[in-house]
Amino acid sequence: MPQNAVSKIVSLAGVLAWDASCTFLNLITPSKKEGSVTPQGHPGADGKWPEYVAPKEGDSRCSCPALNAMANHGILPRDGKNITFEELNRVCRTTYNFAPTFCYFVPNYAANMLGRNYKTDSFDLSDLDLHNGIEHDASLTRQDAVVSPDQSKPYVPFIKELLAEATGKDANGKALLTIEDLSRYSSKRRADARASNPEFTLEKIHKTFGSSNSSTLLTIFGGRVEDLEHILLEERIPEGWESRIRAKFGLTIITFNTSAVSKVEKGIDEEKYLADKKAAAGAVETAGEGSSIAK
Ligand SMILES: *[C@@H]1O[C@H](CO)[C@@H](O)[C@H](O)[C@H]1NC(C)=O
Ligand SMILES: *[C@@H]1O[C@H](CO)[C@@H](O)[C@H](O)[C@H]1NC(C)=O
Ligand SMILES: *[C@@H]1O[C@H](CO)[C@@H](O)[C@H](O)[C@H]1NC(C)=O
């Protein structure tokens, strides 16, 4: 095996062992109190986020709403350029309360994908949109890259459809997205993109990344539709917001996977979506015939 393949496996095993210890520490330490999840001295402490400024011409943005939001608030450079991988690690930790393992793994994966050095190099947000690196088809918030080569802007119709899928309710009756809602809408997006995009691809790893995005909406953002309207449509962090993950060591890879990612992915069923769609079209036709007989 080539040396760097060995070192990659060793480092993934290392990250997972570290992740298991964070997961265990979360079980035995008290969670943070509501209202004090974002650490003092960091943007967003006490719910006070730095000013939101929509991106200007020439600013760099990418296909990920959560990263763009940090640039729009100046938590990452507002122009979205010359960001170090280590900086990305730090701000994901304090802004969203992902575990240190997740915050280490994702920028490392990105550095690797771009052939850059995690410790010494930097990137612009748009660099992350290398097609079929991390960016992939059947997004819940973007048209496929072949239709929309610029992946930096939200595609409003998909986001509205997604949020309209919410079937959950919180204690105050406010709309919540559920695991089933995300599986259902992902089934639709995959089937529709597969049917309409002649260059459609979706490898297993990209399915996992896709379900991870969905799971971020459910975990970090608690599925709250009211918040997600700002996050997804404007790529803005709502005033007073904090991560819905209160665990002291943040959302670990293991907890993320078992509580959401693997469940969202397991519930995705393109065949069922297509069968239901056909049945609904059939029902409309039958109803149409019925009314013509009645005339
Ligand atoms: C990027 O930032 C580093 C310091 O973090 C600086 O030395 C370098 O000149 C910057 N590069 C550009 C192109 O702005
Ligand atoms: C997940 O995020 C990546 C990167 O932003 C994006 O390209 C991809 O389409 C997203 N997947 C889904 C299912 O939204
Ligand atoms: C995530 O969960 C799935 C299903 O339980 C499992 O096959 C996979 O190995 C898990 N991945 C990680 C990184 O824990």
Image (spheres, rainbow, N blue to C red):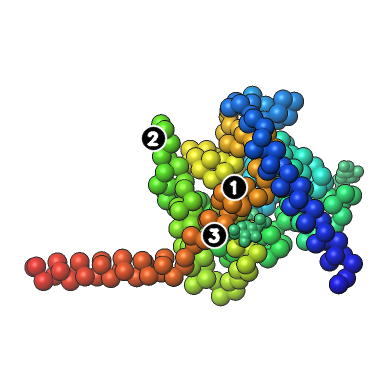
Residues under numbered marks 2 and 3 in contact, where contact means CB atoms less than 8 Å apart: no
The residue to which callout 2 is attached is 173
Question: Which residue does the image show at 73% across and 29% down from the upper left?
Answer: 42
Q: Quadrant of residue 78?
A: top right
Per the image, label 2 sits on a secondary structure element best described as loop
Is residue 73 depicted above or below 5 in this figure?
A: above
Query: Residue 286, percent across and down?
Result: 21, 70
Asked whether 143 or 276 is in front, the reply is: 276
Q: Residue furthest left?
A: 295
Between the residue at mark 1 and the residue at mark 3, the CA separation in whole angstroms equals 13 Å
Q: Which residue does the image show at 67% across and 32% down from the upper left?
A: 29
Q: Amino acid at mark 1?
A: Thr
Q: Residue at x 76, y 47 (%)?
A: 18
Distance CA(mark 1)–CA(mark 2): 22 Å
Q: Secondary structure at mark 1?
A: helix
Q: Quadrant of the C terminus?
A: bottom left
Q: In screen coordinates, is 204 left or right of 85?
A: left
Q: Mark 3 is on which residue type?
A: Glu
| Residue 95 on image: x %, y % | 68, 36
Distance (Cα) linking label 2 and label 3: 27 Å
Q: Which residue is painted at 77% across and 40% down in the image?
A: 90
Mark whose residue sits in front, 1 or 3? 3
Classify residue 95 as left or right of residue 219.
right
- Give the quarter of the image for residue 115: bottom right
Q: Is residue 68 left or right of residue 187?
A: right
Q: Return the disc, 1 or 3, that comes first in the chain's sequence.
A: 1
- The residue at which mark 3 appears reads as 265
Instruction: State the image coordinates of residue 228 (x, y, percent, origin top left).
Output: 53, 42
Residue picked out by circle 1: 216
**In-front residue for pair 103/150:** 103
